[in-house]
C-alpha cells in the first residue's frame, strides 16, 4: 500500500471516529496536524523529488556530454594518427573515406549537441546547477567545433589532394614504365657487349635494337608522365608535388641512363661486329689467296728446258712475292686487330680466335717460304735452262759452222802446200770435235738432269733436241773422221809421189852430171866403155 493511500485511510478512520462522537477536537486537531505535516511532507517530498530529478538531469547531461566528448576525442585521436601528407592515391582515398565517415558521424552529433545545449540552458535557468556546467559545455562545444573544423579541413585537403593526384592512367602508365625499366635493366645487367660468334652478336644487337624500339614506343608514355607531373606541381600541395616530382625524376634518370646504355652498347656492339666482320673477311681473303697460291705451287711445276714458260712462271712468282709484300701489312693488321678483339672476347671465342690466328700465321709462313723457294728454284731453273739452251745453241752453231767449213764446200788442192794445209785444218777440226765430246757428254747429263725435273710436256721436246744434238754430233764426227782419213791418204800418196819425184830428179841430175862429164872424155875405147857401163847402171 502506498503512503498516500495509507493517509487517506487514516483520514477516513478519524472522520468515522468523529462521527461516532469520540473526542472530536483532539482527533480533529491531531488530524489537522497530521494533514499539515502531510502537506509539508508532500511539499518537501516534491521538492526533494524535483531536486533529485534536477540532479538526475545534470547527471544525464554530463553523461551525454561525456559521451559526446569521448566521441569527439576519438575523432580527434583518429585525425592525429592519420598521415598528414599521404601521396598514394589508395591511401588518400582510404583516409578521405574514413574522414568523410568521421565528418558524417560528427555532423550526426550536432542535433544531439543542440538538444544538450537547450538542456544546459534549462538547467541553468533553474539556477540550482553547478557553476561549471556552462563552462564545461562551452569548453566541449569549442573542442567539438575545433575537431569538426579540423576534420572538415582535412576532408577538404584530402579531396584537394585526391583531385590533384594522378589519375588511374598515370598510375598504370607509371607501373608499366617502371616494370619495363626494371626488366630492361635486368637484361642490361648481363654483360653482352663482348666479342663472340658473329651470329650470336647479331642476335644480341637485334635484342638491343628491339629494346631501343621499345624505348621509343614508351617515349610518349614518359612524356605523358612529365606533363602530368608538371600539372600536379601547379595544383597539388608542395609536399605532394615534390614527392611525385622526385618519383618522376628518378624514373626519368633511370630512363636516360637506360637510353644512354642502350645507345652505347649498340654502338659498341656494332663497332665490334664491324671489326670482327672486317677481321673475318681479311682472314677469309688471306686463306683464299693462300689456297690459290698453294694450288699454283702444286700445279705449276717449273718448266725446266722452256725458258719462255720459265720466264712467265718467274714473272708470276715475282708477282706473288710482290703480293706477299703488299699483303704482309694486312696480315699484321689482322694480327693486331685479332689481339685487340681477343681482349674484348669471351674466353672460349678468344681461344678459338687465337688458334685460328696461329694457324693462319703458320700457313702464311709456309706459303711465303714456298713462294720464295719457288722463286729461287725458277730463277735457278731459268738460269740453268738459258745456260743449257745457250750451250746447245753454241754446240749447234759450232756443228753447223764446222759442217759448212769442213764438209759442205768443195776443196781443190793445186799445190802440196794447199793439201798439207787442208790436212792440218782437218786434223784440227777432228781434234776440236773430239774435244767437244766432253762438252756433249756434259750437255747430255745436264739435259737428262733437266728432263728428270721438267714437267711431262717439256720432256719430249728436250729428249728430241738432245737426240738431234747427239745424232748430229756423232754424224759430224764420223764425217770429219772420214774426211780427215781421206785427206791423210791423199796426202800420203802425194808425199810418196813427191819422194819418187825427188829420187827421179836426183837421178836425172846425176845422169846429167855424168853426161856432162863424158862429153870431153879423152882416150880410147876403154874409157868410153866404162862410161857406157855407168850409164847403163844408172838407167
Image (cartoon, rainbow, N blue to C red):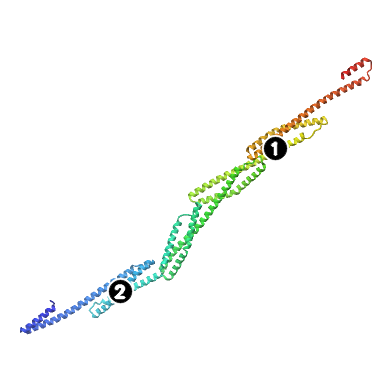
Badge 1 vs badge 2, beta-carbon distance below 8 Å: no
Residue sitting at x 33%, y 71% = 101
Expressed as whole percent of the image width and height from the top left, the position of residue 346 reads: 48, 51
Expressed as whole percent of the image width and height from the top left, the position of residue 104 reads: 32, 73
**Residue 16 versus residue 332: which sits nearer the camera?**
16
Expressed as whole percent of the image width and height from the top left, the position of residue 286 reads: 57, 48
Q: In this view of the protein, can residue 23 be seen by the observer?
A: no
Q: Work out whether mark 1 precedes mark 2 in sequence or the reverse, and give the earlier one.
A: 2
| Residue annotated with mark 1 | 392
Q: Is residue 257 left or right of residue 439?
A: left
Q: Is residue 17 above or below residue 517?
A: below
Q: Is residue 148 left or right of residue 382?
A: left
Q: Is residue 124 above or below residue 248?
A: below
Q: Is residue 162 left or right of residue 39?
A: right
Give the number of the mark in front: 1 or 2: 1
| Residue annotated with mark 2 | 108
Residue sitting at x 72%, y 37% = 396
Pick the quarter of the image with the C terminus.
top right
Q: Of the numbered discs in the image, which one, if any, rests on residue 445?
A: none
Q: Quadrant of residue 130?
A: bottom left
Give the Cα distance between marks 1 and 2: 139 Å
**Residue 223 versus residue 66: which sits nearer the camera?**
223
Amino acid at each position: 500500500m502506498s503512503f498516500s493511500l495509507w493517509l487517506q485511510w487514516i483520514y477516513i478512520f478519524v472522520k468515522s471516529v468523529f462521527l461516532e462522537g469520540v473526542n472530536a477536537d483532539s482527533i480533529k486537531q491531531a488530524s489537522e496536524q497530521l494533514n499539515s505535516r502531510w502537506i509539508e511532507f508532500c511539499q518537501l517530498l516534491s521538492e526533494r523529488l524535483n531536486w533529485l530529478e534536477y540532479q538526475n538531469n545534470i547527471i544525464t547531461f554530463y553523461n551525454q556530454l561525456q559521451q559526446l566528448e569521448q566521441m569527439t576525442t576519438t575523432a580527434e585521436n583518429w585525425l592525429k594518427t592519420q598521415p598528414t601528407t599521404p601521396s598514394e592515391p589508395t591511401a588518400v582515398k582510404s583516409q578521405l573515406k574514413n574522414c568523410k565517415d568521421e565528418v558524417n558521424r560528427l555532423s550526426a552529433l550536432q542535433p544531439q549537441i543542440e538538444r544538450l545545449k537547450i538542456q544546459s540552458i534549462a538547467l541553468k535557468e533553474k539556477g540550482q546547477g553547478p557553476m561549471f556546467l556552462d563552462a564545461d559545455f562551452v569548453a566541449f562545444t569549442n573542442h567539438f567545433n575545433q575537431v569538426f573544423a579540423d576534420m572538415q579541413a582535412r576532408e577538404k585537403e584530402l579531396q584537394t589532394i585526391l583531385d590533384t593526384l594522378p589519375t588511374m592512367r598515370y598510375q598504370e602508365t607509371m607501373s608499366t614504365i617502371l616494370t619495363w625499366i626494371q626488366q630492361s635493366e635486368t637484361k642490361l645487367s648481363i654483360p653482352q657487349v663482348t666479342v663472340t660468334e658473329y651470329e650470336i652478336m647479331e642476335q644480341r644487337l637485334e635484342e638491343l635494337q628491339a629494346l631501343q624500339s621499345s624505348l621509343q614506343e614508351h617515349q610518349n608514355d614518359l612524356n605523358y608522365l612529365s606533363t602530368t607531373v608538371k600539372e600536379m606541381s601547379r595544383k597539388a600541395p608542395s609536399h605532394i608535388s615534390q614527392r611525385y616530382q622526385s618519383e618522376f625524376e628518378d624514373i626519368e634518370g633511370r630512363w636516360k641512363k637506360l637510353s644512354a646504355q642502350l645507345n652505347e652498347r649498340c654502338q659498341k656492339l656494332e663497332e665490334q661486329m664491324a671489326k670482327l666482320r672486317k677481321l673475318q673477311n681479311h682472314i677469309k681473303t688471306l686463306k683464299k689467296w693462300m689456297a690459290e697460291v698453294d694450288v699454283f705451287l702444286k700445279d705449276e711445276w717449273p718448266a725446266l728446258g722452256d725458258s719462255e714458260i720459265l720466264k712467265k712462271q718467274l714473272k708470276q712468282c715475282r708477282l706473288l712475292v710482290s703480293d706477299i709484300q703488299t699483303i704482309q701489312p694486312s696480315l699484321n693488321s689482322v694480327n693486331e686487330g685479332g689481339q685487340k678483339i681477343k681482349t674484348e672476347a669471351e674466353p672460349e671465342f678468344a681461344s678459338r680466335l687465337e688458334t685460328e690466328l696461329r694457324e693462319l700465321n703458320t700457313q702464311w709462313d709456309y706459303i711465303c717460304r714456298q713462294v720464295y723457294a719457288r722463286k729461287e728454284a725458277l730463277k735457278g731453273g731459268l738460269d740453268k735452262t738459258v745456260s743449257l739452251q745457250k750451250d746447245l745453241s753454241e754446240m749447234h752453231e759450232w756443228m753447223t759452222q764446222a759442217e759448212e767449213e769442213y764438209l759442205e764446200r768443195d776443196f781443190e788442192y793445186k799445190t802440196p802446200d794447199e793439201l798439207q794445209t787442208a790436212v792440218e785444218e782437218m786434223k784440227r777440226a777432228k781434234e776440236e770435235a773430239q774435244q767437244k765430246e766432253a762438252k756433249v757428254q756434259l750437255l747430255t747429263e745436264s739435259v737428262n738432269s733437266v728432263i728428270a725435273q721438267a714437267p711431262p710436256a717439256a720432256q719430249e721436246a728436250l729428249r728430241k733436241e738432245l737426240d738431234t744434238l747427239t745424232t748430229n754430233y756423232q754424224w759430224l764426227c764420223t764425217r770429219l773422221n772420214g774426211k780427215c782419213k781421206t785427206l791423210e791418204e791423199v796426202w800420203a800418196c802425194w808425199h810418196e809421189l813427191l819422194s819418187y819425184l825427188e829420187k827421179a830428179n836426183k837421178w836425172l841430175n846425176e845422169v846429167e852430171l855424168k853426161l856432162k862429164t863424158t862429153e870431153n872424155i879423152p882416150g880410147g875405147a876403154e874409157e868410153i866403155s866404162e862410161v857406157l857401163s855407168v850409164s847403163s847402171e844408172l838407167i
